[in-house]
Image: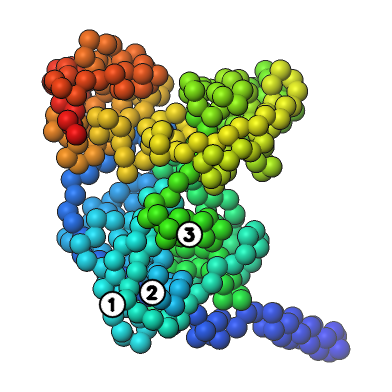
Amino acid sequence: MYFRLVMTIFCCLMVTSNAKAQLPDFASLVAEVSPAVVKINVTFKETNRQSSQAYPRQMPEIFRELLEQQRRNQQDRPKGYSMGSGFVISEDGYILTNHHVVNDADEIRVSFADRSEYLASIVGTDQRSDLALLKIEAESLPTLIFAGQDELRVGAWVLAIGSPFGLDYSATAGIVSAIGRSIPSANNSNYVPFIQTDVAINPGNSGGPLFDLEGRVVGINSQIYSRSGGSIGLSFAIPASLARNVVAQLKETGRVDRGWLGVAIQDVSQELAKSLDLSVAQGALISDVTADSPADKGGIVPGDVITRFNQQRVLDSLDLPPLVGRVPPGESVPVEIFRDGSKQILEVTVAALDANLQDERGQPSSTNYGDRLGIVAEALSDLQKRQLRQRDGVIITEVLPKSAAANAGLKSGDVIVQLGQIGIENFEVYRSVLPKLPRDRPIAIRFIRQGQAVFRTIQLDAK
């Protein structure tokens, strides 16, 4: 009995000793990388941007809550002031952070751990990836490097450094929970395959680096999901592989060009898979193809299921936009589709997304642009039709400030049912009418607001 007790204690001590031996030395890592991490203080312009709760019907509830949380955070931040984190990527003063940290900024101040401070200018920002490139006038700065392509694995240790709630240069650690997590934006576009971690990230960490155990940046902390406002172990980072490409384009041109295919897509359900003779319910089902788009010219038709794009697997519809977005405009790529019970390989030449102002679901592009009216609109879902008791029209999900729509008094949640003399039956009709609207005279617009029909006129910008 005594011998058995001694052996049990010995084994427990060995296990504890081995566990301690396997834990990473975060202290040395923090000391090595902290000098290149910065705190970003921003004074910003007031905006009149309106936001809506009318999110796409296919969006999971957790992501609806995440988007609502982001909207509330923007509204609740102290008037004229915000803060975030960032890090130096070159000795001559280029700094990477989040777009939402510096958006509408009047003044940006960057602080280092040694208490030195610099005024920063914006080289370029990209709302779709939520990244922004800043520049300060300095030399011989400590820098960080990006990790290589596809080197991160689920379960790997990661470390974050930032300024949560203004507490400068705080370090937190955890593991990678998932890779390639698709989080749609409010208008259902998605061009970032996020890294999900359980690292404690809080407001103020945005834009800060996520490190592997070799001190390389594997991601840029961007979003948290929380019911309380604090960390609950669900945080999301932009992968370094995407950031590297965005940085290069922002540095060269101040903007980011993405590939555009010109399709509306949806997931493949089990029932659809059976009807299409698919062995598994995977891929992106093409529900519509824009005329004269790259998809149309490449031979893609409604009913096709894209299973691979540029040699990468497409498991569901949210996998496709990031893959398309990474392809430089003008480049031809192979697209594997399933049609009529068999696989085919098509060659498609990708065009530029921003030149077409549309995302891969056939909707108007991100809120950087809006459409000709200055709104982001989408088709009415079946649930919205029942709730609003409205059969036709398109619903406004965002109104851009100082736009034609804002000047006409349109609001998020309004349902447009007529433009000029044309009834707007659905999103396809709305999309076809927009390019034909005249600029030289007011246009009649009829919309439904809280169950009441309203007639007004809208005047497009004459520029």
Whether residues under marks 2 and 3 lie with C-beta atoms below 8 angstroms apart, the answer is no
| Residue located 48% across and 21% down the image | 291
Whole-percent x, y for residue 425 in the image: 34, 13
Residue 336 is drawn in which quadrant? top right
Q: Identify residue type, mark 1.
A: Tyr
In the rendered image, is residue 261 in sight? yes
Residue 12 seen in this snapshot: no
Calculate the distance from the C-alpha at mark 1 to the C-alpha at mark 3: 23 Å
Question: Residue 69 in the image: x percent, y percent?
Answer: 34, 51
Marks 1 and 3, the one that precedes in the sequence: 1
Residue occupying the point 35% across, 87% down? 114
Q: Is residue 418 left or right of residue 200?
A: left
* Separation (CA) of disc 2 from disc 1: 10 Å
Q: Amino acid at mark 3?
A: Ala
Classify 108 as above or below 127.
below
Quadrant in the picture for residue 452: top left
In-image side of 350 versus 311 (left or right): left
Front-lying residue, 249 or 452: 249
Residue that carries the numbered disc 2 in the rendered image? 93
Q: Is residue 115 above or below residue 311?
A: below
Identify residue for label 3. 248
- Pointer 1 residue: 118
Image x and y of residue 96, in percent: 41, 66
User: What residue is at 40 percent from the left and 30 percent from the top?
Assistant: 363
The amino acid type, in three-letter code, at marker 2 is Gly
